[in-house]
Amino acid sequence: MLVGAHEVAVFERARPRLEAIAYRLLGSATDAEDAVQDTFLRWQSADRELIETPEAWLTKVLTNLCLNRLTAARAKRETYVGQWLPEPVFAGDRMLGPSDTVEQRESVSIAMLTLMERLSAKERVVYVLREAFGYAHSEIAEVLDLTEANCQQIYRRAKQHLATDRRRVAVDAAAARKIVEEFLAAALSGRTDSLVKLLTDDATSVGDGGGVLFSLPRPVTGAVRVARFLRGLFEPSEAKWELIGGKPVLFAAVANGVPALVLVVGDRVAGVVSLDVTADGIAAVHAQVNPGKLERVAREWAAAEHGEPLAAW
């Protein structure tokens, strides 16, 4: 069926919400865009006169498409080289969706998106729709063709899998810059103790090079070990510059709601290092250097103002 201006407008009003749901479900802005586009194609070919509630219909179609993609992604990640991390997005990107509540902000952090990988596909859908978008269990049951009681049970199970005592510190651009400045100064100081002071005792460091750039096959854990690793990582060397294509310029930003260090080589974003900050210190350092997961942030970076660099080599 042809899609008129009204039908296009209905879909475009729903697009930001659909993208935000898909990003939380897939951990990839690129895959989320594809899923939303596929949803539009289904909307385009549907008999829309039979659709009573477009929002519910679009959510159900999108969710089923994401469920299929999650199944395929799980199979691919079994052969993924090194550690897998979500694709980062900068503050202001509509992929992040609503951020009015703590739960909404938590659901899009790199730490939580990574943690959600341990959920089954249906657990992830129920958790995201309930926690981040406030869907009633009856509405989620309609989306997944389950009973309301079953949805409630799945939600409780997902909450148990994701249980954590940590609450991340909410930051704006100014606070994020201050945190990143302090972190970078400690990392460049050459002193392990300077970094240890900023980290929680059980801090972790995870890098995703996607097999394109070197990254450790397992997370580094413990404040001292993480500090030693980061000290070496930030020690300047021509060999490192060659790996990333040149000497980087370092900037502060906010990505997925947390302070982030952005490595820029020429006009290309070569890495995004996200700092998972809690009241007790930096609990995790997530370094995304897989070029395939930096294309969206590179486009955003090129089109935005980003202040003075923190350091350059």
Image: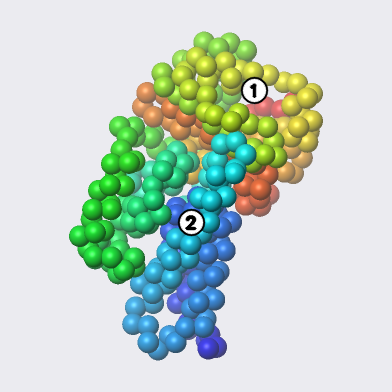
Q: Amino acid at mark 2?
A: Thr
Q: Which of the two discs, 2 and 1, sits closer to the camera? A: 2
Residue at 28%, 41% (x, y): give it: 160
Residue at 45% in and 77% down:
10
Mark 2: which secondary structure?
A: helix
Viewer-side residue, 166 vs 267: 166
Q: Is residue 160 left or right of residue 228?
A: left
Answer whether residue 95 is visible to the viewer in this image: no
Q: Quadrant of the C terminus?
A: top right
For disc 1, the neighbor class at 10 Å (few under 14, some 14 to 19, many from 20) is few
Determine crowd level at label 2: few under 14, some 14-19, many 20+ residues with C-alpha closer than 10 A: few
List the residue tagged with mark 1: 233
Q: In the rendering, at what x and y percent does residue 83 appear?
A: 56, 36
Residue 71: mark in rendering: 2
Type of the residue with mark 1: Leu
Q: Can I make out residue 114 in this image?
A: yes
Residue 20: quadrant of the picture: bottom left
Numbered-mark total: 2
Circle nearer the N terminus (2, 1)? 2
